[in-house]
Amino acid sequence: MGIIEKMRLDGKKIFVTGGARGIGKSVATAFAEAGADLAIVDLDIEEAKKTATELEENNGIKAIAIKADVTKPEDVDAMIEEILNVFGRLDVAFCNAGICMNIPAEEMTFDQWKKVIDINLTGVFLTAQAAGKVMLKQGGGSIINTASMSGHIVNVPQPQCSYNASKAGVIQLTKSLAVEWAKRNVRVNCISPGYIGTELTLNSPSLQPLIQQWNEMAPLGRMGKPEELQSICVYLAGDTSSFTTGSDFVIDGAFTSI
Ligand code: NAD
């Protein structure tokens, strides 16, 4: 079997949080094209259902939509129960749901701080932990978390200390879980994207005026596209990445290199 065939994900059962749109939807599409069955998990159940239907129709795989808030342990437990009922196992978890708030530190309320940390860091912990428990019992699996280049640098000029702190936390959480679970065949990696054109960036009124500035700062002169994160995630989900765990993949068009 050639390397491309070995990278296929036929029959693997995968959940994607924040899978209704943006990076989550794009990566879920790549997983489906590679032959995996999908659970599209999102707060926005209507959009998640549309994504699941589209993936089934275009790829001949099974895809379900699950409404869950990744910050609520009871929702995460119910999500795992439904996945096991429908698919019988879980091979890959893409813990990707996240939000951003651009607020000066001195003006940030406790609730605003907590919301970003809850979704971006605690949400990744809860979903990765729940996936890890299933995978440890099964004897293996692959977890991919979405961090950000903001876990590495303080990108300016927008003030986003809670976002930066949450994403730095995701990188260390990823490495910690990878070390704890390495000998039991559960691999944990993260991706750290640079600016990617999605609802989060393109449709945020506070970020609109900054897009031109980011493009000028970027070595490639542009933002990335969600589909430019697909191949790394397919690699991490599949069996050819068996020696890859505890790694953080910065995919930023060299933004953090300047
Ligand atoms: P997006 O806003 O387009 O999509 C995020 C999805 O997550 C939405 O469908 C939303 O409904 C869902 N979601 C939000 N809170 C949730 C919750 N509590 N429970 C379940 N689902 C929830 O954003 P995106 O740009 O696709 O970002 C996806 C991830 O990538 C985030 O973690 C983000 O921080 C990260 N990221 C994005 C960029 C970028 O430039 N777009 C760069 C680096 C990292």
Image: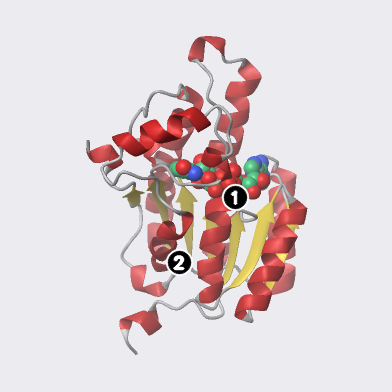
Q: Secondary structure at mark 1?
A: helix
**Residue labelled with disc 2:** 237
Q: Is residue 214 left or right of residue 94?
A: left
Q: Categorize mark 1 by other alpha carbons within 10 Å: few (<14), some (14-19), many (20+).
A: many
Q: Is residue 3 left or right of residue 19?
A: left
**Residue labelled with disc 1:** 127
Q: Is the CB–ligand 1 distance for label 1 below 8 Å?
A: no
Mark-to-mark CA distance, 2 and 1? 16 Å
Above-or-below relation of 228 to 254:
below
Q: Categorize mark 2 by other alpha carbons within 10 Å: few (<14), some (14-19), many (20+).
A: many
> Residue at the spot x=36%, y=45% of the render?
222
Q: Of callouts 2 and 1, which one flags the residue occurring earlier in the amino acid sequence?
A: 1
What amino acid is at disc 2? Ala
> Which is nearer the eye, 68 or 253?
253
Q: Position of residue 258 (x, y in %)?
A: 22, 35
2 vs 1, front mark = 2
